[in-house]
Amino acid sequence: MNSYQILIGDCLELLRRMPDCSVDSVVTDPPYGLSFMGKKWDYDVPATEVWAECLRVLKPGGHLLAFAGTRTQHRMAVRIEDAGFEIRDMIAWVYGSGFPKSHNLGGSHEGWGTALKPALEPITVARKPFPSTVAANVIAHGTGALNIDRCRVKTGDDTARISNGAIKGGNFAAGGSAPGPIAGGHSDGRWPANLIHDGSAEVVALFPAQAGASAPVTGNEPTANGFSGPVKYSGMRERVPGAFHSDSGSAARFFYCAKTSRKDRNEGLLSSDAPAVAKEATMRDCETAEWSTRNGNSHPTVKPTDLMAYLLRLVTPSGGVALDPFMGSGSTGKAAMREGFKFIGCEIDEQYAAIARVRIEHEVSRQQELQAESDQLDLFGTA
């Protein structure tokens, strides 16, 4: 197959045409069943039949990562499980940009309302069952395990822990000052967690700062899940000039992923410089905004490419095929091109599919340009 395929139509019918065991991972942001902005496609979470087809086309041991809403996560997970998947975990994506859609009372009940501020989207982590051991399945199919090392949290901290007087799992010398490997440790950083956040002040404030921290965490630290800092498009990041680099401070720095920027959502598309909504927009503002005329990407629920790239790295073997049956405006596909995976996306809305194609093709062109620059440097022996 080419580096990517975009299939337009009902995903259930499209999936039924795909061969058994033909994809390595499924990473998707499906409808949440919340009737978001009155969209017909969001009237319910996907049916069990859709997840059963995802199970069929996945290789044995292949992982499924599916976003959900907090109110309907239980329905999403149950339907995925009923389709035959094993539920392995749930990743929480936490952000500070949500606004409560609350009916606030007055009179003697002033201060009472009907909703909490939305700040979390759960991601179901599921796996297709397989008959043998994990090691044997990885050898046979390349699937079944998580790519921990490609998703480790970069940090200068000593990750050693003390157990029965012995130092275990660290990457510094016993004194904790001079760098030096310890048996069983890993110099690439901390084990990835099942929590990711957007670095906003509201979220960072939820993490207690360690005593002696010389500066607050701003979300710009280079240590968090390989997300922050200047993009090198190899999945790695560099330190940010002027950012706080002390290895003491809030644990928030270990779980950072920036929220979707205008540049991210609109790269490759014609768009206005005027944002569709103001920074402090309410849900009602979002519902009535002129997305199609003021924003090149009119999809209302665009996920950050960095976030999707991280999730793809976690569950997709090198050179593998990733599937998104609910592609939307193509963030998963754009991320797959960045990470060197192949991609198949299904989308029922032709307008969103057209946006996705432009975004993905723009990323393909960028990767080709970067590869050409790298080849030229190698040709002339320039570091």
Image: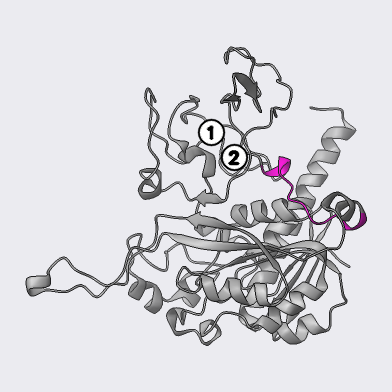
Q: Residue furthest right?
A: 140
Q: Is residue 24 above or below residue 188?
A: below
Q: Position of residue 116 (x, y in %)?
A: 32, 65
- Residue topped by disc 1: 240
Determine whether the residue tagged by mark 2 lies in a helix, strand or loop: loop
Q: Quadrant of the N terminus?
A: bottom right
Disc 2 marks which amino acid? Answer: Pro
Query: In percent of the image, x 77 and y 49: which residue is there?
Result: 369
In the rendered structure, the answer to whether residue 41 lies left or right of residue 276 reads right
- Residue topped by disc 2: 230
Distance of mark 2 from mark 1, alpha carbons? 7 Å
Q: Nearer the viewer, residue 295 or 44?
A: 44
**Label 2 or label 1, whichever comes before in sequence order:** 2
Disc 1 marks which amino acid? Answer: Val
Q: Nearer the viewer, residue 102 or 273?
A: 102
Q: Which residues are magenta?
A: 140-151
